[in-house]
Each structure stands twice: as C-alpha cells, then as structure tokens.
Image (tube, rainbow, N blue to C red):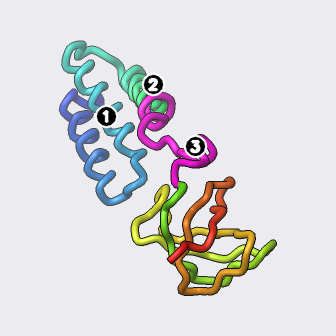
C-alpha cells in the first residue's frame, strides 16, 4: 500500500480548492483546506499511518464545515426579513401584475431588496400595472404597499 507524502495532501488540497471555482457551492473548499491541514501535520510528523491521515482529513474537514456553518455563515448571510419590518418602508417599486384588495400582485424594484428585484405585494386598494408604489412593511415574504402620491 502506498503512503502519501505531505506534498500529496497539499496538491490534493489545492486541487479541491481550485475545484471550488468550477463548483460554486462554497463547500468543496473546506475539504481542500482539510487536506492541507493533513499535509502540514504530515510534514511535521512523517510517520503518520494512512488511516490516521484519512481520519485527520475527515476531522479537519468537518471542523471547517461546522465553523463555516456556525460562525462565518451566520454573520455573512444574515437575513433581515421579519427583524425590521419598517427598514424598507418608503422604497419605491413599479407594479408589474395587478394588485387588488385580498389578492396578491407583483412589483419590481430598480435595485434588489434582500436579493430579489421582484416581490409579491398586497395593498388595501387596487393598483394597476405601471403605477409606482411605496413599501409600507415586510410581512414574511410579501410586501405591503400603497400607491405612490404624485
């Protein structure tokens, strides 16, 4: 059986990190970094068995994934829906599908709000496509709007 050298793990790590460019899931990178950890440990302790190397790779990769999910991802991808209903009050959009009382319509914004430029919307009055509306508040994944005054 072939025992990989430290540089084999480093090459595997670099290849996995580069594979992340082709598979933009931001997940493969953690396995690449785990392989690099094994390469560094193996360079410091060259007598490590293959089983110990594989276990170290799995543990390091899982630690990176958990750290990403718990620490980094939570702070990077924080959504604001429901946390501040009035934060987007006053934003102006254009109706693209009829809005009627008790019936959802659709509005479009020039710049995305929370990553989307098209939103379902409700209003207390009928509003035709092409009219401008102001956002009153966010209600889950629907915006409550009113006709913009001219």
For disc 2, the marked residue is 59
Residue 98 sits above or below residue 25 on the image:
below
Q: CA distance from mark 2 to mark 1?
A: 11 Å
Q: Give whichever of 55, 73 is nearer the camera.
A: 73
Relative horizontal placement of residue 59, taking residue 10 as reference (left or right): right
- For residue 135, say whether it is visible: yes
Residue under the point 63% across and 62% down: 143
- Disc 1 from disc 3: Cα separation: 37 Å
* Residue 94 against residue 87 in the figure, above or below: below
What kind of element bears circle 2?
Answer: helix
Q: Answer above or below: position of 106 versus 39.
A: below
Q: Is residue 112 left or right of residue 89?
A: left
Residue 95 horizontal/vertical position (percent):
57, 79
Image: magenta residue range: 68-88
Q: Position of residue 31 (x, y in %)?
A: 38, 38
Q: Is residue 93 above or below residue 25?
A: below
Q: Which residue is mark 3?
A: 84
Within the image, what quadrant is residue 120 found in?
bottom right
Label 2 Cα crowd, 10 Å radius (few <14 / some 14-19 / many 20+): some
Q: The N terminus lies in which quarter of the figure?
A: top left
Task: List the residue tagged with mark 1.
Answer: 33
Q: Is residue 58 visible?
A: no
Residue found 20% across the figure and 14% down from its top: 44
Q: Secondary structure at mark 1?
A: helix
């Amino acid at each position: 059986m072939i025992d990989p050298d430290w540089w084999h793990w480093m090459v595997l790590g670099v290849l996995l990190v580069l594979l992340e460019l082709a598979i933009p899931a931001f997940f493969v990178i953690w396995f690449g970094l785990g392989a690099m950890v094994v390469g560094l440990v193996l360079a410091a302790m060259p007598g490590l068995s293959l089983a110990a190397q594989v276990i170290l790779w799995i543990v390091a990769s899982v630690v990176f994934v958990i750290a990403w999910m718990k620490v980094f991802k939570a702070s990077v991808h924080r959504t604001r829906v429901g946390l501040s209903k009035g934060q987007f009050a006053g934003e102006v959009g254009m109706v693209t599908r009829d809005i009627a009382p008790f019936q959802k319509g659709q509005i479009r914004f020039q710049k995305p709000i929370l990553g989307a430029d098209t939103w379902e919307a409700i209003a207390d009055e009928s509003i035709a496509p092409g009219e401008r509306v102001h956002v009153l508040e966010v209600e889950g994944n629907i915006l409550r709007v009113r006709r913009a005054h001219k």
